[in-house]
Structures are given as structure tokens and as C-alpha cells.
Amino acid sequence: MRVLVTHHLPFNGTASGRLSYELAAALQAAGHEVRCLIVDMVREGTEPFPVRRVCCRAGDPTADLNFDAPSFASETRGRQTFESLTDPQLAAYREAFRRLLDREVDRFDPHMIHAQHIWVQGQLALETGVSYLLSAWGAELKSYAADPRYRPLADQAAENAGKILVSTESQRDRVLELFESAADRTLVVPNLSAETLGNIYLSTFEERFGRAP
């Protein structure tokens, strides 16, 4: 399958970023075609698979976004959090990511988008019309409660995701406190492997389109 993995920070920024890298590498090794779209402070990397970056760097007028990459407050990555973005910055962030996401969809034609967190990128994946699933981590749930600007976006992302993946039952319970309609689509998968993910991608695609990719 052709899989596009997205994340809101560099691969080395958080646990979810590191897992995104590991999953992309494992999927490629298992024979899937993989590309990634991430937010980063640099434009180039050394990954063994294609990566497109939204360059987000304060003080750099040549960057896609002239401010630091936002993170969730609970990630303690820096002072630039999603909550601290101004309305114009949030609009610019969404537009920059949408532009590159649309470009990747046009060029790569993925069967599946796998976005980390029930958040902005999931809602933008919905807008592409491509089948997508989400990995929920929990950091986004705190920001969901803290900033009402993101709630409609996260609600849309969760409501339309083919699957939402969590690692524990307690995490599933936390997700369903906010997104009750996702109960039958939220899966507890303690150990994600390329084989497990490939099967989940395939079943998600078939459920939507009634055929294999």
C-alpha cells in the first residue's frame, strides 16, 4: 500500500515523532511505499524514505512559517504551544500544512494517511478525501480541553477517521470521554508492527471502498 505518515514535529521531537519514524521505516522494509510529511525547523534530513517538511522557524523569512513549531503544552518542548498561537498564526499553520499535504496527495496518491494525534492534521487529512486513521496519544486531549479553537477540528478528525489507534485500555477510555462516536473504531494495539499496521490499513480501506487497494 501507499502510506503517507504525518506528524506535527520533527521525528526526534517527541515519542510520537520517534514512533512515526520507526513505523515508516518498518512499513518500507515490509514492502509498502511510504512518504512522510512533518513540521520541522530544517528542510532536509537523512531519512531512508521520502520526507516533505513544513519549515517552521522563528526569525527566518524564508521559512514556510516564521515562528517556532508548536507543540502540546504537556510535551514541554518549548514556549510555542498550540494554545499560544495567535489566530493568524493558526490560520497560517493550517494553510501551510494543507498546501504541502495536497501536493503530496496529488503526487503520491496514497491509499492511507496515518496522522499522529486527534488534531489539526487529522482534520486536514479528512479534507483531502483520502482514507485516514489516527494514533491518539493523550497530549492532544489536554489541549482539546484548554483551547476551544481546536475542538471542532479534533471532533471532525475523530468522527471521520477510519480507525483511532491507542496503546492501552485506559487511553481508549480517555479518548471516548471526548469522542463517544468513535467507540467502534478505536482499537487498542499495544505493539504496533508493520504487519499489524498493514492489516489495519487494508481493512480500513476495504471497509470504506469495498475492495482492496
Image (cartoon, rainbow, N blue to C red):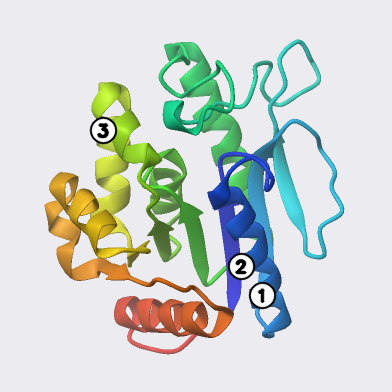
Amino acid under disc 3: Arg
Residue pointed to by mark 1: 26
Side of 203 where 81 appears, left or right: right
Task: Work out whether residue 12 or residue 131 is closer to the camera in this orientation and state it.
Answer: 12
**Image vertical order of residue 2 relative to residue 15, above or below:** below
Of marks 3 and 2, the one in the foreground: 2
Where does the N terminus fall, quadrant-wise? Answer: bottom right
Residue pointed to by mark 2: 23
Question: What residue is at 76 percent from the left and 10 percent from the top?
Answer: 59
Distance in Å between CA atoms under marks 3 and 2: 28 Å
Tell me whether circle 1 and circle 2 mark residues in contact (CB < 8 Å).
yes
Distance in Å between CA atoms under marks 1 and 3: 33 Å
Question: What residue is at 65 percent from the left and 64 percent from the top?
Answer: 22
Task: Work out whether residue 33 or residue 140 is closer to the camera in this orientation and state it.
Answer: 140
Residue pointed to by mark 3: 151
Amino acid under disc 2: Leu
Of labels 3 and 2, earlier in sequence is: 2
